Amino acid sequence: MLRFFSIEQGVIKELAPLPDTPVEVSIKNAHWIDTINPTPQEQNALAKTLNITFPDSVDVEEIETSSRCFIDNEGLHVHALFMSPNEGRFNTVTVACLLQNNCLLTIRDEELADFRLLRLRARKGQVACDTAKQLLITLFDQKVENHADMLEDMHHQLEKLSAYVLEEDNSDLEEAVGRIARLEDANGKVRLCLMDTRRNISFLIRRIGAQNDERESLREIVLDIETLMSHCTFLFDKVNFLMDSTQGFINIEQNQIIKTFSIASVVFLPPTVVASVYGMNFNIMPELQWEWGYPFAIGIMLLSGFAPYLFFKQKGWL
């Protein structure tokens, strides 16, 4: 799928597809071409019109620094990580950005919230820019803002989870451990994306040849990233504390169970000894012929069982 946008009077606007219009014409008229899992025909049209080699998935996902940010005869290439929610978890998706003259080409395999929001703002005329270069900067700026919102949401979730684990009596600790693990994973993915964005912004500052206001915007983004990185560290500490507390409560519950079984074994040990004594088959055992021998043995077993129980109760071990 291809979406086309143009810059008109300082704002970015989406170009509505015209019937019977060759895709090559739309490519030439666009300042931003957003591709989502394009078909082979669309890839060929882009490669021919923009005179580029369309990258495959392996090239886009390449993690070496030299492969993710570079300049060649096709233009300026930046491969950036973006967050993608998937069944309650977050995954990282690499988006290839190509800045060529006054045209920005973004290549990705799936829909992402950052691009969906940018398209929504573009339809409302809320994305101000004069060049494709400024649009690329705006994309990274919005990406960092979305990461800030994610971290704020994770902070609220951790606060609720902390109250659930530390204050509620009947909390499901095993379920809480799973929630903590998901939050830790999400925080790690956000931190990874922020580190990748900082590296991309540093590359743009060195190579983009930006004007003073554009360089200032890039530096402000770097400062925001540094602040968010510190918040990520704080969330990691909070997650570790909450995980340690949850595991401590689980250990306390397990110790209580083991303690109960230990006390039960001690309580039943003396009656077992009495029963073992009177279960022996010797010829001379005076109590065997005694009329009150049976109730006497039962009484001794009950007394020997209740005595340890009352002792533990008095000591506060039960």
Image (cartoon, rainbow, N blue to C red):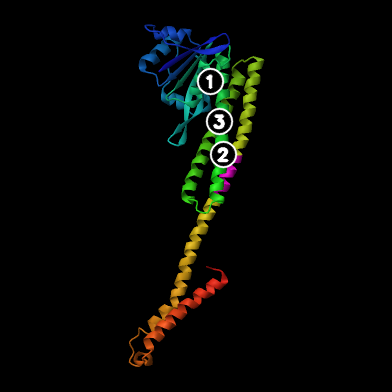
Depth check, mark 1 against mark 3: the one in front is: 3
Q: Earlier in the sequence, mark 2 or mark 3?
A: 3
Find residue 70 and name its label: 1
Residue at left 64%, top 14%? 211
Q: Nearer the viewer, residue 192 or 305?
A: 305
Determine contact: label 2, label 3, CB under 8 Å.
no
Mark 2 lies on a secondary structure that is helix
State the residue position of label 3.
147
Q: Quadrant of the N terminus?
A: top left
Mark 1 lies on a secondary structure that is strand
Residue at left 51%, top 37%? 186
State the residue position of label 2.
156
Q: Is residue 300 left or right of residue 9?
A: left
Depth check, mark 2 against mark 1: the one in front is: 2
How far across and down, in percent of the image, does residue 158 sit? 55, 42
Q: Earlier in the sequence, mark 2 or mark 1?
A: 1
Quarter of the view holding residue 217: top right
- Identified by mark 3, the residue type is His
Residue at left 64%, top 24%? 220
Disc 2 from disc 3: Cα separation? 14 Å
